[in-house]
Image: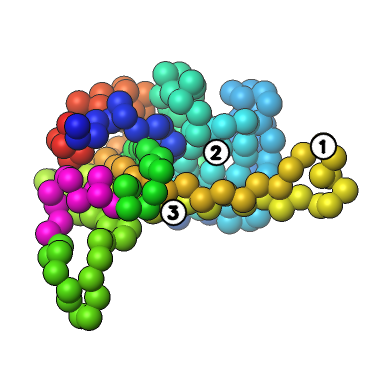
Amino acid sequence: MPLTLEDLDFTQFSFELRFVHSYLLWDRAGRIWQETTRLLPKATVTNAAPNKIVMKDGPVELNVEPDRVGIQLFDRELLKGIPAVAAEFTQMVSSILELSEFTRVGLRMIYRKVFPTKGGAAAEIMKFGFLRIPEDRYFGVAGLPLYPEITFRKEEGSKGFSIRIKAEAIEYKLELPYFWHKVAKSVSEVHETVTFDLDSYVQGTILLSQIAFEDWITQTLHVIRRDANGFLGG
């Protein structure tokens, strides 16, 4: 059976606004931190460099740079409520930095499925029919393809999307100090996966007065769920 979006595990949600470089970030970073803790009281600052602020609250990560602001989520259980949180955070940053327009508004979703072997992950990619790889010996090499990847982009007017589908080996490695071994173990695992990475966006001159972030995120999530299976074969 072909894969569908329901067969894949949610991995990452990313909402991002891009804009012309805003130098106000250097003067108003403290206010952004303060307002963020009102929105997410448990958020902590993990990076406070002049050109990048990073705040985290569990599986939620918030980023502010001179030319972009974004929010990432890594927990499927919180996905239902993230449009409202993302909208409030980006609206707040836009207000503090006095942003009236954006050059790009995008939503990226990443899904993965783990396979027992790298051959199994590669075979699943080949089922989609996007690639034609001869089975005979070429360039002195025979055998099955390893880690095939499909990447493409489509645009119409100000709207567009890009899709990346690939088989890949994801390494999880955590080496703990020896004296921790009585309470925890080091981790070293490689997961052979199929990754489905979709970025839906609008670009050009996007006025703040013309876009409602929560509605845009909710609608884009709906379209992704509706249309993604057309590329997975489901």
Answer whether residue 125 is magenta in the image.
yes
- Secondary structure under badge 1? loop
| Placement of 30 over or under 66, stated as above or below | above
Q: Nearer the viewer, mark 2 or mark 3?
A: 3
* Label at residue 84: none
**122 relative to 183 in the view: left or right:** left
For label 3, the residue is 169
* Label at residue 62: 2
Q: Earlier in the sequence, mark 1 or mark 2?
A: 2
Residue appearing at x 56%, y 37% in the figure: 61
Residue appearing at x 48%, y 21% in the figure: 77
Whole-percent x and y of residue 131?
Answer: 15, 56
Q: CA distance from mark 3 to mark 1?
A: 29 Å
Q: Which residues are magenta?
A: 122-132
Query: Dot 1: few (<14), some (14–19), or many (≥20) neighbours within 10 Å?
Result: few
User: The residue under label 2 is which amino acid type?
Assistant: Leu
Q: Nearer the viewer, mark 1 or mark 2?
A: 1
Query: Dot 2: few (<14), some (14–19), or many (≥20) neighbours within 10 Å?
Result: many
For label 1, the residue is 183
Pick the front one: 96 or 193: 193
Whole-percent x and y of residue 68?
Answer: 45, 48
- Secondary structure under badge 3? strand
